[in-house]
Image (cartoon, rainbow, N blue to C red):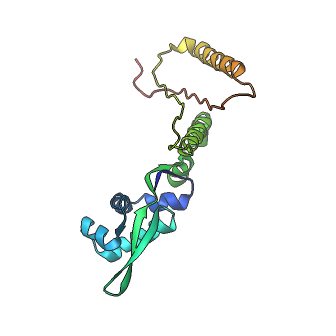
Amino acid sequence: MRDVLYLEQIEQAEALLKPQRVEVLRHLAEPRTCTEVAALLGQTPQRVYYHVKQLAAAGLVEQVATRKVRGISEGIYQAAARSYWLSPRLVGRIGGLRRARDELSLGYLLDLMEEVQADVAALDRTAPELPSIGVSGEIRVPTERRQEFLHDLQSTLQDLFTRYGGAEGDAFKLAVACYPKGDNHE
C-alpha cells in the first residue's frame, strides 16, 4: 500500500467523491472481503461489492488475494493508498467551469500548488533523508505599499535563483505562494 495516491483522472475523483465509497475505503486500510466490510458498515455484501468494484476500476482499491468460502471464491481487497490527493485541476472540472475573468490571476497559483502536490507525492518517503522545509506566515502590507512588497519579494527570490542556480549540486524546487488572506482585513 502506498502512502499517497495522487489522483489526476476525473474517473478516479468521481469514484472517490461519494461518501459511501470513502467509508468503504477507510475499512479497506487492512485487507478485507466485501462481506467483512459490509458487516462493519451494516450494509449488504452486494452493495459493498458494487462500491469496491467501482473503486477497483478507478485504481483506488486492489484485490490482494482470494479465498474459498463454502466453495465460492471471495476476493480480499485493500485500499491502494493510505491517503488520496485530488488534483486541483480535477476540482475545477468536477465543480464546474471557473469564472475565468475573476480567477485568471489565481490560475498560475493553482497550477503551482498542483505541481507542488505532485512533486511531494512522488518523493521517496523511504529515503533516509528528505531535506525539505515548509514555511508559512502572514504579512500585512498597506495598500499603498503592495507593489513595493511584491517587487521586494520577487527581487529576493531572483537573488536566490541567481546565487544557487548553477549546474552542480542537488536540485531543489522552490515555490512561493502569495495571495490575499480573505475578508479579515483591518
Taking depth in this image into account, of 114 and 66 the one nearest to the observer is 66
Taking depth in this image into account, of 80 and 18 the one nearest to the observer is 80
Drawn side of residue 131 relative to residue 84, left or right: right
Drawn side of residue 99 relative to residue 164, left or right: left
Q: Compared to 28, does 83 lie above or below?
A: above
What is the x, y in percent for residue 169? 69, 28
Residue in view at x 53 percent, y 15 percent = 143
What is the x, y in percent for residue 51? 40, 69
What is the x, y in percent for residue 77? 40, 68
In this rendering, the count of numbered labels is 0
Q: Compared to 130, does 90 lie above or below?
A: below
What is the x, y in percent for residue 59? 51, 63
Residue in view at x 54 percent, y 31 percent = 131
Residue in view at x 46 percent, y 59 percent = 80
Residue at the limit of the structure toward the right, as seen here: 167
Residue in view at x 47 percent, y 16 percent = 140
Q: Quadrant of the C terminus?
A: top left
Residue at the limit of the structure toward the bottom, as seen here: 71
Q: Compared to 112, does 135 lie above or below?
A: above
Q: Quadrant of the N terminus?
A: bottom left
